[in-house]
Image (tube, rainbow, N blue to C red):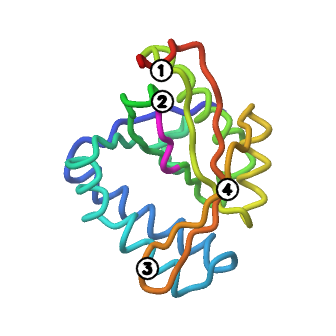
Amino acid sequence: MSITFEPVASEEDRLRLAQLADEIWHEYWPALIGQAQTDYMVERFQSLEAIERDMREHGYEYWLLCADDGRIAGYTGGCEEPETNRFFISKIYLLADERGKGFARRTIEFYEELCLARSLQAMYLTVNKRNDLGVRAYLGTGFEITDAVETDIGNGFVMDDYIMEKRTDGPMPKA
């Protein structure tokens, strides 16, 4: 099954993205981080307001992942970091019924192509240490664990993540 990456551009696209994020997060994350932290993180990082803020203030780009029959399978997004010559992949999320179909691997290939087209040296992401499915998927596509971090996100919650990076053929950043 093939997948296309439709840029999130319109207000309608952003609203659809926020609704999709809410659905995916509330299906997947409560078992790993609890309902309260899931609710908090959706509001802080995945809501319509958060998406629009990230696009406006941090240069985030988002794409809806569309299967060949037109259904939306998930979403992805992140931002280019000129100072490190890398792309930060902030989000790769799939609906439950779409997992295991190769869409995550195709999304990583999409980012590899994007990094090469933009002459970026690497791409990186953070993944919850307890998200075994995610960690295995990223290791299987050539990412390496480069660090482990605990980030206080407020309201008594902490993100306990690995930082994972995959090099591309882009040039080294200027010193």
**Mark 3: amino acid:** Tyr
Measuring from the top left, give residue 158's x and y in whole percent.
55, 75
Confirm or deny contact between disc 4 and disc 1 (CB under 8 A): no
Of helix, strand and loop, which mostly describes the magenta segment?
strand
Q: How far separated are the C-alphas under marks 3 and 4? A: 22 Å
Boundaries of the magenta span: 87-91
User: Which numbered circle lies on residue 40?
Assistant: 3
Q: Is 34 situated above or below 55?
A: below
Give the farthest residue toward the front.
Answer: 175
User: Horizontal and vertical percent for residue 169?
Assistant: 59, 13
At x 49% / y 73%, what residue is drawn?
152
| Residue drawn at point x = 66 percent, y = 43 percent | 164
> Could you tell me how many numbered marks the image carries?
4
Of labels 4 and 1, earlier in sequence is 1
Q: Secondary structure at mark 2?
A: strand
Q: Quadrant of residue 149?
A: bottom right
Depth check, mark 3 against mark 4: the one in front is 4
Q: Amino acid at mark 4?
A: Ala
The answer to whether 26 appears left or right of 130 in the picture is left
Of circles 3 and 2, which is in front? 2
* Between discs 3 and 2, the one toward the N terminus: 3
Q: Secondary structure at mark 1?
A: loop
Mark 1: which amino acid? Leu
Sequence-first disc among 2 and 4: 2
Can you give x and y, in whole percent of width and height, for residue 35 in the image?
56, 85
Q: Which residue matches tag 4?
A: 148
Q: Nearer the viewer, mark 3 or mark 1?
A: 1
Check if mark 2's residue and mark 1's residue have beta carbons within 8 Å.
Answer: yes
In this rendering, would 73 be left or right of 99? Answer: left
The tag on residue 86 is 2
